[in-house]
Structures are given as C-alpha cells and as structure tokens.
Amino acid sequence: MELSNKRIVVDLDLCIGCHSCSAACHYGHLNQTNLVAGNVEEIAEVPANCRHCLNPACMASCPTGALFKDENNFVRRANLLCIGCRSCSLACPFGVIGYEFTRHVSPKCDLCIDRVEDGKIPRCVSACASGALQFVELTPETIPETLVGGRFVAHSKIRRA
C-alpha cells in the first residue's frame, strides 16, 4: 500500500472541540500525547497534526539526527537520540511539535505508523466523533484546500519568543 501521500487533514467546520482525538493519542501512545492543539481566533481549539513536510525544518534543526524520514516520507523521531533541546519545536513553522516534555522528548505526531502499516487509520482519526479528522491521499488538486486552513487560520498554543 502506498502511504507516502497520505496525511491527516482537519475540517475546521466539523471540529466540535471534544478532544477525543487527544485522548485516543494519549492512551494509544502509553500516556504520551503526540497531538497538539491550535486556537482558531479565540473561537475554537482544534487538533494540529504534523504535516510531514517535504523539506522539514524540524529535521534540519535537530543536532543529533533524532528526526528522520522513513521509507514512506513520514518524519519520525528516534527517541533515544533526542537530547531534549527543543530546536525541532522552535523550527517547526506550523507549531505542531509540542514544547512541553513527555519522557524527556517533545511530543510529535508519528501518524500512528504501527496502525497505518497494518492498513488501519491513525488513532486520532478513528476516535474523531464529528468526522473532522480524515486520513486522505493528497493530490495536486486537494493540497491547496487541505493545507490552507491550518497554516493561515489556526495559531498554535505554543508561543515563540
């Protein structure tokens, strides 16, 4: 199965702010939440997933090589190599790598690769009661409509100095 073009997208109109996605992420990753939330104009709080960029700034900023791209072009973290410097969370232009430590590393979405490789969908998507989160194949036609909302409307709760 070709996974390299599949990503989690958020339909801001459908998100009801129930945080079931965060709960599923938390319990599915042994009490480590890899999902951060973004505030939309002080009106709503929505999940903000890693975009697994083509040229990830987080990966370039990592001094130890703890962030890497796997065979599906997903940005992953080797937790044992992470020294907790937080350079990845500061470098991410979308603010989706958490600044607060969990087990001495900053939380980062791994797309539930253990589930995805088995043909399942990520935990946050399967737990989304309103259907706001979807795991879809990005095509040149869908990229503009799926990425604009998160980048230009939602603001990460993580504030950079």
Image (cartoon, rainbow, N blue to C red):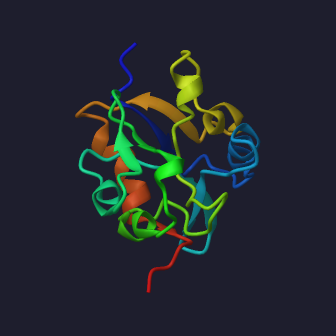
Residue at left 52%, top 30%? 113
Question: Image quadrant of residue 3?
Answer: top left
25 versus 158 height, above or below: above
Residue 80, visible in the rendered structure: yes
Question: Image quadrant of residue 28?
Answer: top right
Foreground pick, 109 / 49: 109
Foreground pick, 2 / 135: 2
Residue at left 65%, top 34%? 123
List the single residue furthest toward the bottom: 161
Foreground pick, 98 / 77: 77
Residue 49, visible in the rendered structure: no
Taking 73 as reference, is 140 left or right? left
Taking 60 as reference, is 26 left or right? right
Residue at left 60%, top 51%? 34
* Residue 79 x/y as whole percent: 53, 49
Foreground pick, 33 / 138: 33
Residue at left 38%, top 37%? 74
* Residue 56 x/y as whole percent: 30, 53
In the picture, which quadrant includes the C terminus? bottom left
* Residue 149 x/y as whole percent: 41, 56
* Residue 112 x/y as whole percent: 57, 34
